Image (tube, grey):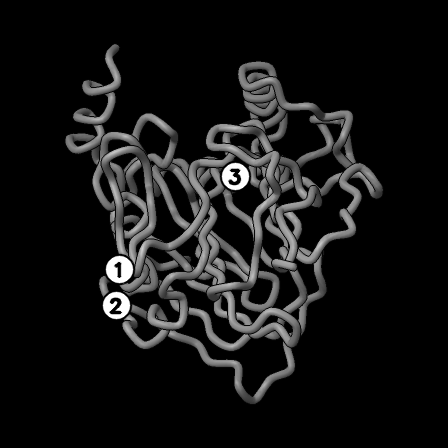
């Protein structure tokens, strides 16, 4: 099947229905059936269970428990850097925000305002700043961690489509990361100023969750929802878990101008691991 046909089929698929069904299956306690499903999935995608805190696939009551499995302590050391990679995955794109445009793939861009759900004032803080789009494939560890320490300010759930976010779709669907469902998390850092982490939903992503809220999109509606945390002291350290995907997706990060110089070893499509150096403040 050609890449173009794969993309065109996604427009016709009942993505919402498939995602709802997948979420129900992934949450079921199916005993031997669940264990067999996990074994098949792990074999199909080459999941390295030796890194898991519990390497026994029969020890997971649901597929979701397996998919969001924690890692063994020490397998992802945190680099000595101002910013570390928050996930296991692959780099889609990264670099400078061109005025207010972010590169999705060759020939496709979207704006920071679109990404954060239409909040022009928030988006303006990142004009000429930096961005990084990181894709988590089915085989990857699916908990999300902090690139640097920060205090939670706001969280916004933006309803949207549920296209796949794999590299083929990123090249073929315009405004993909700004049209899919997403959760926008806004943090303030004493050292680096405001930064944003956007959890982007996708086909068969049953839900997205944060450590302070739990599942954010349990009920999918049409209205944008916002939570403010000005009166709470939710502070997460660098490398600390901040959320998770139930099935694979993408995270987009925004940083203010002059805050990060990316790791020179980074390049589009390169694999990355949680805790490796993402960048430092410019000298």
Residue 118: give its label.
2
Sort mark 3 into few (<14), some (14-19) or many (20+) by Cα contacts within 10 Å. Answer: some
Against 143, residue 100 (above or below) is below
Mark 3 or mark 1: which comes first in sequence?
3
Against 13, residue 148 (above or below) is below
Furthest-top residue in view? 1
Sort mark 2 into few (<14), some (14-19) or many (20+) by Cα contacts within 10 Å. Answer: some
Alpha carbons under labels 1 and 2: distance apart: 5 Å
Furthest-front residue in view? 283
Count the marks.
3
Q: Quadrant of the C terminus?
A: bottom right
Residue, disc 3: 28
Residue, disc 1: 114
- What residue appears at the point 43 percent right and 44 percent down from the top-left corner? 206
Mark 3 or mark 2: which comes first in sequence?
3
- What residue appears at the point 54 percent right and 67 percent down from the top-left corner? 213
Q: Where is residue 108 in the image (x, y as percent from the top left)?
A: 24, 40
Front disc: 3 or 2: 2
- What residue appears at the point 54 percent right and 71 percent down from the top-left corner? 187
Q: Are marks 1 and 2 in contact (CB under 8 Å)?
A: yes
Alpha carbons under labels 3 and 1: distance apart: 35 Å
Against 68, residue 229 (above or below) is below
Q: Quadrant of residue 173?
A: top left
């Amino acid at each position: 099947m050609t890449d173009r046909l794969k993309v065109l089929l996604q427009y016709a698929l009942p993505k919402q229905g498939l995602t709802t069904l997948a979420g129900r299956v992934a949450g079921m306690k199916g005993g031997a059936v669940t264990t067999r499903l996990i074994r098949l999935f792990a074999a199909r995608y080459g999941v390295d269970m030796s890194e898991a805190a519990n390497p026994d696939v029969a020890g997971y009551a649901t597929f979701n428990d397996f998919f969001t499995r924690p890692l063994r302590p020490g397998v992802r050391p945190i680099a000595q850097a101002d910013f570390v990679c928050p996930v296991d995955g692959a780099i889609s794109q990264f670099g400078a925000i061109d005025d207010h445009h972010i590169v999705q793939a060759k020939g496709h861009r979207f704006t920071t305002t679109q990404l954060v759900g239409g909040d022009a004032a928030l988006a303006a803080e990142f004009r000429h700043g930096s961005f990084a789009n990181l894709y988590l494939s089915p085989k990857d560890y699916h908990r999300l961690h902090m690139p640097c320490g920060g205090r939670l300010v706001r969280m916004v759930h933006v309803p949207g489509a549920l296209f796949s976010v794999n590299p083929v779709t990123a090249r073929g669907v315009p405004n993909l990361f700004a049209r899919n469902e997403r959760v926008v998390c806004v943090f303030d850092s004493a050292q680096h100023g405001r930064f944003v982490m956007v959890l982007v939903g996708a086909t068969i992503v049953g839900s997205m969750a944060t450590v302070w809220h739990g599942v954010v999109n349990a009920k999918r509606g049409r209205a944008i929802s916002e939570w403010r945390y000005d009166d709470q002291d939710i502070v997460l350290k660098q490398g600390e878990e901040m959320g998770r995907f139930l099935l694979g997706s993408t995270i987009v990060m925004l940083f203010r101008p002059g805050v990060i110089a990316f790791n020179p070893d980074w390049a589009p499509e390169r694999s990355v691991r949680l805790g490796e150096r993402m960048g430092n403040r410019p000298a």
